[in-house]
Image (cartoon, rainbow, N blue to C red):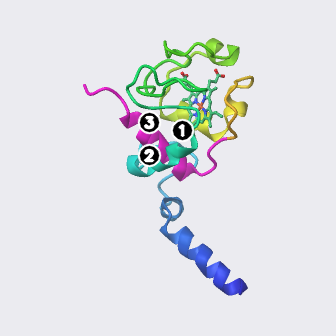
Amino acid sequence: MRYSIFLIFYFILSYSPAMAQVNNVSAPVQVAEANGDADKGRTVFFRCRACHSISQNQNGTKVGPNLFGIFGKPVGSVATYENYSKALRDANFIWDEQQLDNWLKNPNGFLPGNTMAFSGVMRQSDRDDLIAFIRQQKAAE
Ligand code: HEC
């Protein structure tokens, strides 16, 4: 019984992108990279949908700001959102891969006092996929 559980676990692990990264010594696992899979990221985004929409619809404000086009924007700058905490209003950076990774890994550790009631996305590969998806959701150039 124990053995078969181990086998299942091994099976899942060996097919996950995280394992592919672990096996590839040249790819540092802890650093956010532009190597996520946006299609998988769309699925990971289900964890965010209760509070965020990510469509171009300007009325897309839920508990949290609409995240359409957030990649490359300054933190706390979505014009249609009026409930930013002081933590986000006082922060000063652009949402790029690294900042999104810091935020999604541990929102409270990264910007203490924020009001996003979310503990974080634990797996690096999930965060990479999610960030690739968020990055893709922007107006056509
Ligand atoms: C329980 C509701 C909730 C969930 C779940 C949630 N968020 Fe949020 N999010 C918020 C709120 C509220 C804010 C505004 C926080 C503040 O002002 O302190 C926010 C802010 C953000 C911001 C900053 C936006 C800006 O304008 O600077 C990003 C990026 C973000 N969330 C991404 C995500 C992603 C990606 C997920 C899913 C992994 C997620 N959030 C899950 C409620 C949520």
Q: Secondary structure at mark 3?
A: helix
Tell me the distance, in whole angstroms, between the alpha carbons under discs 2 and 1.
10 Å
Residue furthest to the front in view is 59
Q: Find out whether residue 19 is within the magenta segment.
A: no
Q: Quadrant of ligand 1?
A: top right
Tell me the distance, in whole angstroms, between the alpha carbons under discs 3 and 2.
8 Å
* Classed neighbour count for the residue bearing mark 2: other residues with Cα under 10 Å, few (<14), some (14–19), many (≥20): some
- Span colored in magenta: 120-141
- Image point (45%, 32%), residue name: 54
* Classed neighbour count for the residue bearing mark 3: other residues with Cα under 10 Å, few (<14), some (14–19), many (≥20): many
Of labels 3 and 2, earlier in sequence is 2
Q: Find out whether residue 132 is within the magenta segment.
A: yes
Q: Which residue is mark 1?
A: 49
Q: Secondary structure at mark 1?
A: loop
Q: Amino acid at mark 1?
A: Arg
Q: Which mark is residue 42?
A: 2
Q: Amino acid at mark 2?
A: Arg
Residue 76 in the figure: left or right of residue 73: right
